[in-house]
Image (tube, rainbow, N blue to C red):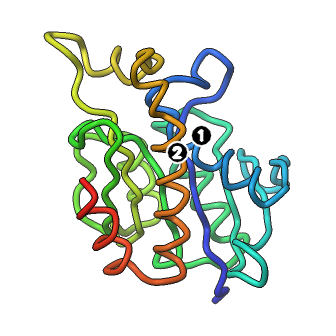
């Protein structure tokens, strides 16, 4: 199988969702693509846009991917792109929003539950395994009695928006460190920061 890594940024399509909490995964991938000097192009075999390249000079080969469909139907496109490039689940990293982590905090893991995250649930179903990596960008819990579905589809608050670039940068660093140094090293760095 390929030694490339597939990095998936979860989110919903369209400008109305671009700045919402649920789209933090896609924001992170946009930043990685920008750092690579690349732009996303439509994939020929999947409902997705991709960037192929290397992380850093002479770094590992990566495929960045954003589904063109909605978050809860991410599985099919992720599976199709992984098959196309011959990438196994142990070389897939999904970057996504995480309600159960405070805003501006990052956690990394492999496998485990989906915590009610429909995008992850669909990916697990399509891949037939939970054993892929997750970079979880904390967005915090909704205030008061706000509905969770409404909360994740709202833009970040003005205060959060100030710190959002740092969360995105840290998520980019977490993805790179996970690939180059392994999960334990990345967890040690990012989990102790919180």
Give residue 81's position: percent from left, percent from top: 67, 62
Q: Residue at x 36, y 40 (%)?
A: 118
If the image is split into quadrants, where does the N terminus sit? bottom right
Query: In which image quadrant can residue 21 be found?
Result: top left
Give the residue displayed 45% in from the left and 15% down from the top: 158
> Dot 1, how many residues are within 10 Å of its Cα: few (below 14), some (14-19), or many (20+)?
many
Q: Is residue 56 above or below residue 37?
A: below
Q: Position of residue 130 (x, y in %)?
A: 33, 66
137 relative to 58, above or below: above
- Residue 28 appears at what percent x and percent y? 58, 47
Real-space CA distance between mark 2 and mark 1, rounded to the nearest whole angstrom: 7 Å
**Residue 177's disc number:** none
State the residue at coordinates (24%, 38%): 102
Q: Which residue is mark 2?
A: 168
For this orientation, the residue located farthest to the top is: 145
Dot 2: element = helix
Which of the numbered marks, if any, corresponds to residue 27? 1
Q: Are marks 2 and 1 in contact (CB under 8 Å)?
A: yes
Q: Earlier in the sequence, mark 2 or mark 1?
A: 1
In the depicted view, which residue is nearer to us: 154 or 55? 55
* Mark in the foreground, 2 or 1: 2
Whether 167 is drawn above or below 191: the answer is: above
10 Å crowding of disc 2: few (<14), some (14-19), many (20+): many
């Amino acid at each position: 199988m390929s030694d490339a890594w597939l990095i998936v940024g979860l989110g919903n399509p369209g400008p109305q969702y671009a700045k919402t909490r649920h789209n933090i995964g896609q924001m992170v991938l946009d930043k990685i693509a920008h750092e690579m000097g690349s732009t996303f192009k439509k994939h020929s075999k999947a409902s997705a846009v991709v960037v192929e390249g290397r992380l850093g000079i002479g770094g590992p080969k990566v495929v960045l991917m954003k589904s063109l469909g909605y978050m809860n139907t991410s599985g099919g496109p992720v599976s199709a792109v992984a098959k196309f490039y011959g990438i196994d689940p142990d070389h897939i990293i999904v970057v996504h929003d995480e309600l159960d982590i405070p805003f501006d905090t990052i956690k990394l893991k492999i496998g485990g539950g989906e915590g009610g995250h429909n995008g992850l649930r669909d990916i697990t179903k399509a891949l037939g395994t939970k054993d892929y990596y997750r970079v979880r960008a904390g967005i915090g819990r909704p205030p008061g009695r706000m509905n969770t579905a409404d909360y994740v589809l709202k833009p970040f608050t003005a205060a959060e928006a100030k710190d959002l670039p740092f969360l995105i940068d840290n998520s980019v660093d977490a993805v790179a460190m996970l690939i180059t140094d392994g999960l334990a090293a990345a967890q040690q760095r990012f989990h102790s920061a919180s």
